[in-house]
Image (cartoon, grey):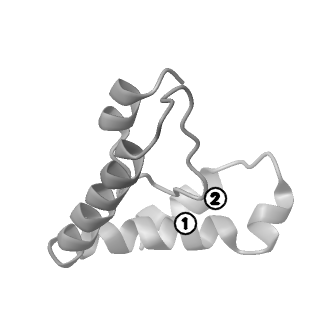
Amino acid sequence: MIKELWQYVATSTELPVAKQMGFLKEAIAIDARAKRCHRQWDAHYLKCKETIVAATQRAVQKRTVLVFGAGSLNDIPLSYLSSQFLR
């Protein structure tokens, strides 16, 4: 908990409203929870990655991939995406 508090205090944001609305707090909290519960979340992360890979295999032109709302990127297969798309 002290680590999360320090991370919150030490993190500056481009948009102060992100802290005011609680987005930074929630991002830090979910990251800590993911580390604590990694065994329980591994199946979820794997399923997310498999779903993303399956979706990208349907792409006709593999020029650009855009990821929205990825948070900590724990459930995104970044190395796969970077090897499959130009950008």
Q: Position of residue 73 (x, y in %)?
A: 42, 52
Mark number, residue 27 = 1
Q: Which residue is mark 2?
A: 9
Instruction: For the C terminus, give its image quadrant.
Output: top right
Foreground: 67 or 61?
Answer: 61
- Dot placed on the residue nearer the N-terminal end, 1 or 2: 2
Q: What's the residue at 78%, 74% (across, down)? A: 21
* In front of the other: 31 or 49: 49
Tag count: 2
The reply, left or right, for residue 6 in relation to residue 83 is: right
Kind of residue at badge 1: Ala
Q: Work out how far the residue at label 1 is from the one at label 2, CA to CA, in angstroms.
A: 13 Å
Residue extending furthest toward the top: 86
Q: Nearer the viewer, residue 66 or 43?
A: 66
Element under label 1?
helix
Q: Please name whichever residue, 33 or 49, is drawn nearer the observer in this view of the structure.
A: 49
Q: Amino acid at mark 2?
A: Val
Q: Residue at x 51, y 65 (%)?
A: 28
